[in-house]
């Protein structure tokens, strides 16, 4: 018969083996609580979604001068929310004209109007290589639909992570999950700087094929929505809409004159410049803004 001491020794050995196996095993996936919020930020380090309790967004009616692209994105987002075919979208063009604001506003409107479990997930530019992990997580949660959003997406000459994005969007063996769509904003239509393309052309054995590889990244987006600098009338329309929405009491002539002076000192007219003026005006009038 086995002595008590031998039993204790065997138990100790088995405990050490079990401990070693636990250390070798991958850590368990953190629990995913999708009901915690409608918007999340993807953490590549922890491979988890961090809930965002309050999204920094502007109401859709306040986005002026972008009616055509607004309607296109809303229609595409609604089709996706209803489980119908929809395209990845690249919102490109002039700075400060509401590209990222439109994505966030479209998510809020379509999520509310369709009643779908529509989640907005922001992935930072530097975490793009972790997109396959995020897609795997999304694929496991088919009861929700996910808009994966990357703001200010672009790549420099030494960056090769764009290849991960290409494969993840369309080229991978599994393909994009049926319950996911990818929206990105960028100041560049082709996401890559011209000197990067020209360098590839000068050093490649077949220059045209090298450039085609770079340009093909943008081809993964079925929708290209262009944003252009606004006119003076559109700029003043934005200003007047903001002032009315937030109840800022100021004469119309004074409002327009101040807004024009503000845009002149900034050297540009855009939705961002209009919002910056409204913040200044609200501060001078002693009025707090809700966003």
Image (cartoon, helix red, strand yellow):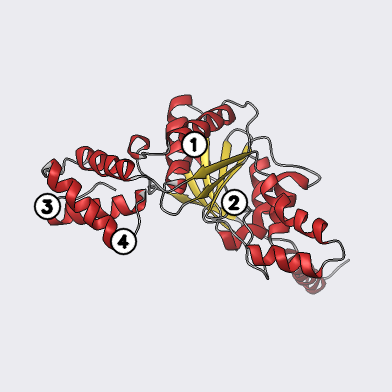
Q: What crowding class fits label 4: few (fewer than 14 Cα within 10 Å), some (14-19), or many (20 or more)?
A: few
Disc 4 vs disc 3: Cβ atoms closer than 8 Å?
no
Element class at badge 4? helix
Between the residue at mark 1 and the residue at mark 4, the CA separation in whole angstroms equals 26 Å
Between the residue at mark 2 and the residue at mark 4, the CA separation in whole angstroms equals 25 Å
Residue drawn at point x = 71 percent, y = 53 percent: 215
Quadrant of res 197: bottom right
Between the residue at mark 3 and the residue at mark 2, the CA separation in whole angstroms equals 40 Å
**On the image, numbered disc 4 is attached to which residue?**
266
Q: How many discs appear?
A: 4
x, y percentage for residue 273? 32, 54
**On the image, numbered disc 1 is attached to which residue?**
69
Q: Is residue 195 above or below residue 172?
A: below
Q: Can residue 105 be seen at all in this image of the molecule?
A: yes
x, y percentage for residue 281? 18, 53
**On the image, numbered disc 3 is attached to which residue?**
285
Disc 2 vs disc 1: Cβ atoms closer than 8 Å?
no
Q: Is residue 78 above or below residue 280?
A: above
Image quarter of the N terminus: bottom right
Task: Mark 1 or mark 4: name the one nearer the start of the chain.
Answer: 1
Task: Mark 1 or mark 3: name the one nearer the start of the chain.
Answer: 1
x, y percentage for residue 269? 34, 52
- Side of 66 where 222 appears, left or right: right
């Amino acid at each position: 018969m086995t002595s008590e001491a031998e039993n204790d020794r065997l138990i100790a050995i088995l405990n050490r083996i079990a401990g070693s196996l636990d250390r070798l095993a991958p850590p368990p996936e953190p629990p995913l609580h999708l009901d915690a919020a409608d918007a999340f930020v993807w953490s590549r380090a922890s491979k988890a979604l961090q809930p965002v309790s309050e999204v920094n967004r502007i109401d859709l009616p306040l986005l002026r001068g972008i009616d055509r692209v607004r309607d296109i994105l809303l229609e595409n987002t609604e089709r996706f929310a209803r489980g119908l075919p929809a395209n990845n979208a690249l919102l490109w063009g002039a700075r400060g004209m509401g590209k990222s604001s439109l994505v966030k506003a479209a998510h809020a409107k379509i999520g509310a109007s369709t009643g779908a479990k529509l989640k907005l997930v922001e992935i930072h530019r530097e975490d793009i290589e972790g997109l396959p992990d995020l897609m795997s997580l999304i694929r496991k949660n088919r009861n929700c639909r996910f808009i994966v959003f990357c703001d200010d997406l672009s790549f420099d000459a030494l960056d090769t992570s764009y290849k991960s994005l290409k494969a993840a969007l369309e080229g991978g063996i599994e393909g994009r999950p049926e319950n996911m769509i990818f929206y990105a904003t960028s100041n560049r239509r082709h996401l890559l700087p011209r000197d990067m393309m020209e360098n590839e052309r000068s050093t490649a054995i077949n220059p045209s094929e090298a450039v085609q590889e770079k340009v093909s990244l943008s081809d993964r987006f079925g929708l290209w929505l262009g944003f252009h600098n606004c006119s003076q009338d559109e700029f003043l329309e934005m200003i007047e809409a903001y002032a009315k929405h937030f109840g800022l009491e100021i004469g119309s002539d004074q409002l327009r004159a101040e807004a024009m002076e503000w845009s002149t000192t900034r050297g540009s007219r855009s939705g961002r410049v209009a919002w910056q003026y409204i913040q200044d005006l609200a501060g001078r009038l002693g009025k707090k803004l809700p966003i």
